[in-house]
Image: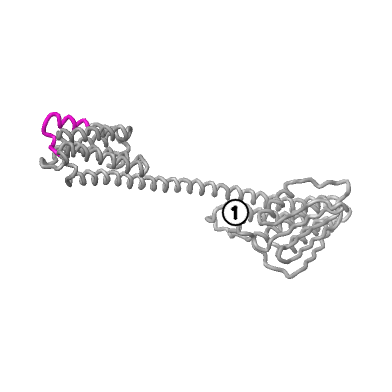
Amino acid sequence: MRAWLRSRPVVGDVTLAILLVGLAAAVPRDAPTGATADSVQAWALVLTSCAATVFRRRWPYPVLALTLAIAVLAMVTQEGAAGALLPLLVALYTAATRSSTPVALGAALMCAGSLVVAFGVAEHDGWRSNTSYVLIAWMLLAAAIGIAVRNQRRAVSEAWERARVAEESREQEAQRRVNEERLRIARDLHDVVAHHISVVAVQAGVAEHLLASDPAFAKEAIGTVRRSSAEALEEMSTVLGLLRGDSDGQPREPARGLDALDDLVESVRAGGLGVAVSESGARVQLAPLVDVTAYRLVEEALTNALRHGSGPAEVAIQYGPRTVLEVRNPVRSAETVGEGHGLVGMRERVTAVGGMVTAGPDGRGQFVVHAELPTVVPILGREQL
């Protein structure tokens, strides 16, 4: 019923006006504020005041002024004064719900003062009686209820607004994480495909070139192509498995870290690139995201060396408060290594974990990738959560 009336406020206000008329008719004849609505003039005042409450939502202050004027007139003439007070209380309550606390209290005191003066005029110094205190108490009570209802409505409205903002924030956060996951998967796919396809391309070229002159070596190169293809498919299955739900029952293998560096180096060496690895400092267990980032960085650097380099590559890892990775390989002086997706993804990965990376020629015929990674991902790195 409340929801039905709330969606039809006019019906509720008309119903309230009818109830006020019924209450005015039921006021005892010995009411302290004056005579009840017995005469035609008294009923005219009461009905006019009750009818005005129908418009209290649209025009709260004009309705308050009209009901106050009618109550004062009824008080002075002693024509339906008790019944005319009821619409005034409703109008004062409505105005209090739409006003600030000082304004509401000021309106209550103004109404109480006007009624006390009118009662004093009608009763010849009647303002000294207890009825004056009753009038003041009722006006203040109506305003206090209006103020309480206004504060409660405001609290509910603010709670709904906070809930709405929180819901929007959750949706935005979910969308942001989806975008970050898509970007991460795209980086992983690029790293996997670029590395293994580079090995496949080099070894396929070697096999084609030596197929007639050295079939044994060509067969070995074809075997390398087969192994690299199988590893690429395996890693792509792992990456793409993140896009599937857990309901398929397939196991989820952890992403590769520096523990798999030896396998990476062997696959690159099988592709025809010499690689020398050196480590210094006490080896520490890196945070999972940092470990994956370090592996992918070395993989991308060695892939670029395999595709664009002109000699063996060197991988240097220095453990400490910050893990330092450096991959260098000679490049032909006439060749310029472009800013491809690999280098861009490399920088995004390292930046995401709070590290820094530089990549480019050193001016002495060497292309150097230098990165500094934190041992632990900072708190702001939400991907670690």
Question: Given the current orientation, which residue lies at the most extreme front position?
Answer: 125
Answer whether residue 233 is magenta in the image: no
Amino acid tagged 1? Leu
Percent position of residue 87, x then y: 23, 37
Decide which of 330, 221 is in the foreground and name it.
Answer: 330
Percent position of residue 328, x then y: 82, 57
Percent position of residue 89, x then y: 25, 40
Quadrant the N terminus occupies? top left
Q: Residue at x 17, y 29 (%)?
A: 44
Q: Which residues are magenta?
A: 34-48
Decide which of 269, 147 is in the foreground and name it.
Answer: 147
Q: Main secondary structure of the magenta part?
A: helix
Q: Is residue 223 above or below residue 340?
A: below
Answer whether residue 43 is magenta in the image: yes
Q: Residues within 10 Å of mark 1 (few under 14, many from 20)?
A: few
The residue where tag 1 is placed is 242
Decide which of 191, 316 is in the foreground and name it.
Answer: 316
Q: Visible in this render: residue 46?
A: no
Q: Residue at x 80, y 64 (%)?
A: 277
Q: Visible in this render: residue 218?
A: yes
Quarter of the image where one finds residue 50: top left
Quadrant the C terminus occupies? bottom right
Quarter of the image where one finds residue 5: top left
